[in-house]
Amino acid sequence: MPVKMVLNNNAQPGSVPVKIFTSDIENSALQQLKNIAQLPIVYSHVAAMPDVHMGIGATVGSVIPTLGAIIPAAVGVDIGCGMNAVRTSLHAHQLPDNLKPLQDAIEAQVPVGFARHKQVHARENAAKNLASGADLLFARHPELLKKLRNPQETWVTQLGTLGGGNHFIEICLDEDNFVWVMLHSGSRGIGNAIGQHFIQLAKRDMEGHIHNLPDRDLAYFQEGNPHFDEYVDAVHWAQEYARVNRQEMMKLVLEVLQGQLPPFTLTSEAINCHHNYVVREQHFGRDVFVTRKGAISAQHDQLGIIPGSMGTRSYIVRGRGNPEAFCSCAHGAGRRMSRTAARKRFTTRDLVAQTMGVQCRKDKGVIDEIPAAYKDIDQVMENQTDLVDVVHTLKQVICVKG
């Protein structure tokens, strides 16, 4: 489907349009999009993906092109959060009838929730390539040392760990019943500390005229500001950390499968894509910083991953390079209600019913991740036929959450 709605905030001189690829959007998210569109640093227009919903400051599911400036709160605190997926040669009939031992083995191999690797050298080889950047980061920003207990150790032991919230590891079957491994995580505690640190710095830097902003969380750094280059370096490191984190988890999960299932090979190149990040790109004739907050890059022929909620379908897609969306697409189903609202509305009985056929946690600790708390993934996909083509449709059989 093409753009469903265009907001032209004519009451604000200099405000750019907002192009929205859905009609399913709450008023609070619309207001956030209008706020972003008022910023003098935004170029051309703001794009909102079909899974758009209210975030903190910047809307989740938004794509924001900026000229010579970056909004740290739009990138967020889970810097580089994204997806990793790979197809194996395994077939559905090669999976055991009882999937619980496989779920348990994955959870034993990959630390989930607040857990981390017990040994600092557990992911030592992967950490080596990140170490020099980490040393520079802590030297420049000793404040980060106060935000993390044993920070130099924390980022290493959390490498190759899942975390909590909406992060997950899934074993899925595609339309031909081949087995896929798919996972979702980001830059863990260190990414969160970096995000919070620079969001506060941006607010302090703009104290003199922050009252002119439609939302304090939209404070930004401009090129020339000493913190701008520092943030670019820090966010680049955190995005690389997130990518490596997913790569290391994938290795651990595949080790589990190799130990418990028949021999197999990987039949597709791993897809590893961010959906909370900033990158320099060219759009409409200008070199801009593109912040995708809950959106993935969907350049022409680029492969991406769009997960549904636990209990619904997910999709491997190929980008169509739509310029109106800044060559982007949705990053998932998108929340329909807050975590607090989901906990109040649903019970463990609802969770059991909505995750039938999926081996996963079905306790009150994950009620906020119940499928009904999310938008209909099939409707989201229908609204972005101009943005991506579906390559594979996946259905999970195991879902591991923190």
Image: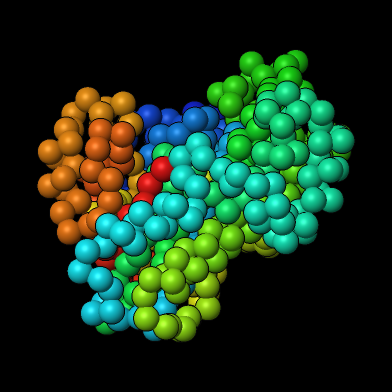
Q: Position of residue 320 (x, y in %)?
A: 46, 72
Q: Can you give x and y, in whole percent of width and height, for residue 250 in the image?
A: 52, 64
Q: Is residue 326 visible?
A: no
Q: Is residue 247 left or right of residue 370?
A: right
Compared with 398, 61 (above or below) is above
In this rendering, would 16 be left or right of 267?
A: right
- Can you see residue 301? yes
Q: Nearer the viewer, residue 45 or 386?
A: 386
Q: Position of residue 353 (x, y in %)?
A: 12, 47
**Image location (x, y in percent) of residue 222:** 77, 37
Q: Quadrant of the N terminus?
A: bottom left
Total numbered badges shown on the rendered structure: 0
Asked whether 24 or 253 is in front, the reply is: 253
Q: Quadrant of residue 337?
A: top left
Image-based side of 268 in relation to 175, left or right: right
- Quarter of the picture holding the C terminus: top left
Left or right: 90 in relation to 93 = right
